[in-house]
Amino acid sequence: MDYSKKVLEHFQKPHNYGHMKNPDGMGKVGNPRCGDIMHLYLRINKDVIKDIKFETMGCAAAIATSSVVTDLAKGKNILEALKIDSQKVVDALGGLPIIKVHCSLLAADALAEAVYDYLKKNKRDIPEELEKKHESLKKEHEEEAE
Amino acid sequence: MAQKRVYLDYAATTPVDPRVKKAMDPYFSKVFGNTMSLHSFGQESKIAVEESRVKVADLIGARPEEIYFTSSATESNNTVLKGVKGNIVISSIEHACIEETANWLSKKGVKVTRIPVDRFGKVNPSDVEKAIDSETALVSIIHASNEVGTIQDIKEIGRICKEKKVLFHTDASQSFGKIPIDVNEMNIGLMTASSHKICGPKGAGCIYIRKGLKLDPLLHGGGQESGFRSSTVNVPAIVGFAKASEIAKKEMNKESERLSLLRDKLIRKVLKIEGSFLTGHPEDRLPNNASFYFSFIEGEAIVLHLDFAGIAVSTGSACSSGKLAASHALLAMGLKHEDAHGSLRVSLGKWTTEKDINYFAGELNKVVKKLRKISPFKK
């Protein structure tokens, strides 16, 4: 596989992996059928991501995108973090093979879902776009389960 | 210090045996004539090819004139499937070059029936019998699975086809030269074999066609290979293929015994890892194939981590395929998508040592632990 040096670095030594107990926000994305499953956990203080952890079952690209998205999000205000999209993940990794770009979507989705979970739990207003994204991910998940 | 490198992907391809290379050497610049030329340059090449035919035939109990050289097993399999007129019966665990050719043929209106396999990858011969009808032209069943090494009961399937008067082909790319094959005893009408899987060079393969059987050629032109396969004959590759066949015949018994012992040792070591499972048949499998799946982790990630440790193996995971689809063969054996995702094929060969096996098992253990630490499902 044609992976960039950066992808291989993150794959070999992923940053911020592991479980987090009682996270303030949690995102679970992916499905067993495609194989890649990502869990992302947030510790949030005054709307700032103080700590972030991930757990991923998947290929090198899935692990690398998980790792790099935690780097990108750490220390950011949650609304700022929502601006991290798949393109930013790909760029941070110095590119991904075309066939693996969907992994970067997974990482961005996991982050968005974790922020959604935090806002929902705290009965906060949810940006319309985030709500839409959440609904479409939920729908995708249900379709896969069928 | 140079990094330790251990090659355990002999089912993908093999290094050329130095004896093979030596046998090929004169046929690049010294003896180079076109086998179709009437002059002495051409005739020298022709003699080399005819001698090669004898050696390849000898390994499978065939007559030399029943061997047709091709460029690869893929070409051989394409030729067989496209060279018959009528419907086709194949197994559900064929190599891509049968599977994809069958898909192409079904778009052209050929009815393709796929025989299921059990969880060990075995075809039940009576299912083949049931699938054959008056429109069936050909049954093609892989001899030994390229993914899990399961060996089919070719003799019985061949007997059924003979009785039903249907052409029977087996793709023996993985088994040729590794386990005994006798085309007469095993009721084989057509067979595919490959050079580079048995320490011969790439670029040579063959089709065995039982005398009296007719196939349409795939390539038309100058009429080489008795008019069946036009193309300037690749003499050095064929000479190498023949030498590799000759060596395989001589060394097969001892080598398959040695490899079976190593394979079993490897399997025992790997199965000590929690959440590891053997795929393929526990007994009826190639002496050099050990294949597994590991729960909660993904195959491409395993392969890459092992590659960092200098170890070469392969996987049937969706993530590693160009199509992002899990191996059709593993799914046909009833593996769940997520399990096929964690599949690993380890294939041994001529230069595999016990030390290699130990190193592999140790590194694999570390890799599985490392990936499970990252996986959400480990506990």
Image (cartoon, rainbow, N blue to C red):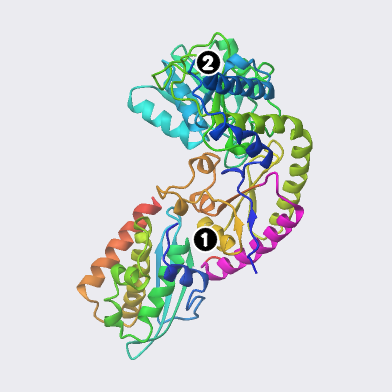
Q: Nearer the viewer, residue B236 or B262?
A: B236
Circle 2 chain: B
Q: Position of residue B315 (x, y in %)?
A: 54, 51
Measuring 62% from the left and 16% from the top, which residue is drawn there?
Answer: B64
Measuring 55% from the left and 57% from the top, which residue is drawn there?
Answer: B303
Q: Nearer the viewer, residue B371 or B257?
A: B257
User: Against B48, is A5 above or below?
Assistant: below
Q: Identify the residue position indicated by label 2 in the image.
A: B167
- Circle count: 2
The magenta segment is: B348-376
Q: Left of B19 or right of it: where is A82?
A: left
Q: Nearer the viewer, residue B16 or A51?
A: B16
Q: Identify the residue position indicated by label 1 in the image.
A: B301
Circle 1 SS class:
helix
Please state which amino acid type lies under the numbered disc 1: Ala
Q: Position of residue B128 (x, y in %)?
A: 55, 22
Cα distance between the residues tagged 2 and 1: 42 Å
For the question of whether residue B102 can be seen, the reply is yes
Residue sitting farthest toward the top:
B212
Measuring 51% from the left and 32% from the top, which residue is drawn there?
Answer: B72
Circle 2 SS class:
strand
Q: Position of residue B251 (x, y in %)?
A: 76, 34
Q: Nearer the viewer, residue B50 or B207?
A: B50
Q: Left of B180 or right of it: where is B235?
A: left
Instruction: Classify mark 1: residues with Cα within 10 Å, few (<14), some (14-19) or many (20+).
Output: many
Q: Quadrant of residue B194?
A: top right
Circle 1 chain: B
